[in-house]
Image (cartoon, grey):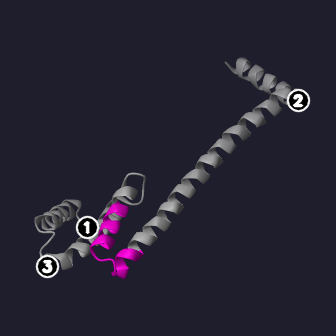
Amino acid sequence: MVVCAKGVKQVADSVLILITWSDSDVMYSWYIHRCYLKLGQWQESLHGINELTIPAVLQYYATATDHDAAWYKAWHAWAYMNFETVLFYKQQQQQQQQQQTSEAGGATNRAQADANPASRAGLVSVISFVHMCV
């Protein structure tokens, strides 16, 4: 489903106006928890899961659970987003470790190549060949 970002922004602004307009009215209190859940879902679908959106989405879901503590959908969305957050940061940490390992492995390979007389001789012959061609 493709959603126009401008249209979603307008709807989200309208929802926020509804939320701030009357938090205490019984008529609107039934909708407020649903609005916060929808805001979290929109934020997640529009911008994905990243370091910038995680706090906002979690806050929307937590606020939905605050307004209706018995609503399972809000609790499920909040719990699932926490799970996705842990996976996101775990994957990010693994990528950093792999990058550090590959950088360290490259330095080790270069050090081993420098220590190997055959590889130095091969490098000298390549450099000599390049100089002859120029």
**Which label number is shown at residue 118?**
2
Instruction: Look at 21% across and 64% down and name the residue there.
Output: 8
Q: Is residue 15 magenta?
A: no
Check if residue 70 falls in the magenta segment: yes
Label 3–label 2 contact, CB within 8 A: no
How far separated are the C-alphas under marks 3 and 2?
83 Å
Q: Position of residue 67 (x, y in %)?
A: 27, 73
The residue type indicated by label 3 comes to Val
Disc 1 marks a residue whose amino acid type is Val
Give the residue at the far right of this rendering: 117
Q: Amino acid at mark 2?
A: Ala
Q: Which residue is mark 1?
A: 3
Nearer mark to the viewer, of 1 and 2: 1
For disc 3, the marked residue is 26
Mark 2 lies on a secondary structure that is helix
User: CA–CA distance between discs 1 and 2?
Assistant: 61 Å
**Quick one: 79 or 9, which is closer to the camera?**
79
The boundaries of the magenta stretch are: 57-76
Residue 62 vertical placement versus 50 (above, below): below
Circle 2: is it few (<14), some (14-19), or many (20+) Cα within 10 Å?
few
